[in-house]
Image (spheres, rainbow, N blue to C red):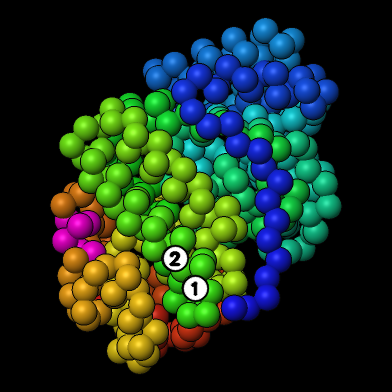
Amino acid sequence: MESFSFYNPTRILFGKGKIEKIGKELKKADLKKCLMIAGGGSIRKNGVYDQVCESLRENHIEWIEAWGVQPNPTVEKVREMITLAKESSVDAILAVGGGSVIDSGKATAVGVFLNDIWNAYTEKEKITRALPIFTVLTISGTGSEMNGNSVLTLSAEKKKWSISSSLLYPRVSIIDPSVQNSLSFQQTVNGAIDAISHILEYIFMNETAIATRAIDAGLIKTIVKMTNRLQEDAKDYVARANLAWSATLALNGISGVGLQGGDWACHSIEHAISAIDPKIAHGEGLGVIFPAWIEYVSEREPDRFSWWVKEVCGEDSVARALRKCRETLKRWGSATNLRELGIRESQLPEIRDLLLTYGPIGEIIRFRAEEIEALLMLAY
């Protein structure tokens, strides 16, 4: 097993009724005023907003609200929130929503101390300070509630890039799975695929990390099983809770211990696709790219996938395992090729060229222009 460093300072409050604790958590940290960041308004409909406001009010925490974060969040919107945070002199960030909202909250927390937040994503400025971050999660999938990562898109240049820092870990994240009952099944599926993809980025790297891969196999099977149950009953709390916790564990560091940092080619490729067309959900895009990537890479290194075929998929060949994966995606109503995502063949060169500006892509195979073209055609 490879040597590794593991770190995670985020405290999780998990379960029904935990949202009412958020104000107390800010008060305990001696914070007085926060910027509450939210998306398009779903938290008003599912009761989360009222619970958060009541908790803040009871604990004498002032707050300013910033709404309008969209899926595939943009640096342009974050710049607006940074300006608001500075003008309002807040001393904390409270992100209430899914991964896009939390990623935007992290970027805002860092950006108040930088000349421009995008400089952190291009590494022109180092991350040395951040406002304390608190989150109330309303959709599981990205794992942003318990990691130090943030992804933003610079719309003008169609660049969807990431940052990572120990300063971006939330102090406290609240996960009440019951509030996710109002999600559409497609939203649930997108989060499930994203979580599975986080694990898949790691598990093909090193066969000696036996303990970690055993955890990862269990997480993937649980995510699939719980998503199947939620397809039958969206209010199945046991399924909702186990899916939510599995999605958190999929990218809080545990799933990658001893696995050499992962490969991450598929995430890079999907980032380019959803940068070209921001309407494409990140999880659904990964559901198209990952099977194509496995198919492509396994032709070169078939033995690398033997453990996954047997232990995760319960099959005896890569072809059968991939068929099973794609059948699951179809049953969930998710896309299985780029055409179903709305990508035109004429856009593939643009995706390729955009990827080539991202820097090195992949670890198992380092993708050059011709490999990118071949993979995109396989996914098409």
Q: Of all residues shown, which one is farthest toward the top?
A: 58
Q: Is residue 359 visible?
A: no
Q: Position of residue 12 (x, y in %)?
A: 60, 36
Badge 1 amino acid? Ile
170 on left or right of 279: right
Task: Look at mark 2 in the image and give the residue it sits on.
Answer: 214
Badge 1 vs badge 2, beta-carbon distance below 8 Å:
yes
Prevailing secondary structure class for the magenta stretch in the rendered image: helix
194 is higher (above) or lower (below) than 313: above
Q: Nearer the viewer, residue 153 or 246?
A: 246
Q: Residue placed at 44% from the left, 65% from the top?
A: 214
Q: Is residue 9 visible?
A: yes
Label tally: 2
Instruction: Give the secondary structure at mark 1.
Output: helix
| Magenta part of the chain | 325-330
Q: Position of residue 242 (x, y in %)?
A: 39, 41
Q: Residue placed at 57% from the left, 42% from the top?
A: 145
Task: Look at mark 1 in the image and give the residue it sits on.
Answer: 210
For the N terminus, give its image quadrant.
bottom right
Badge 2 amino acid? Ala
How far apart marks 1 and 2 lie (CA) works out to 6 Å
Residue 188 lies in magenta, yes or no?
no
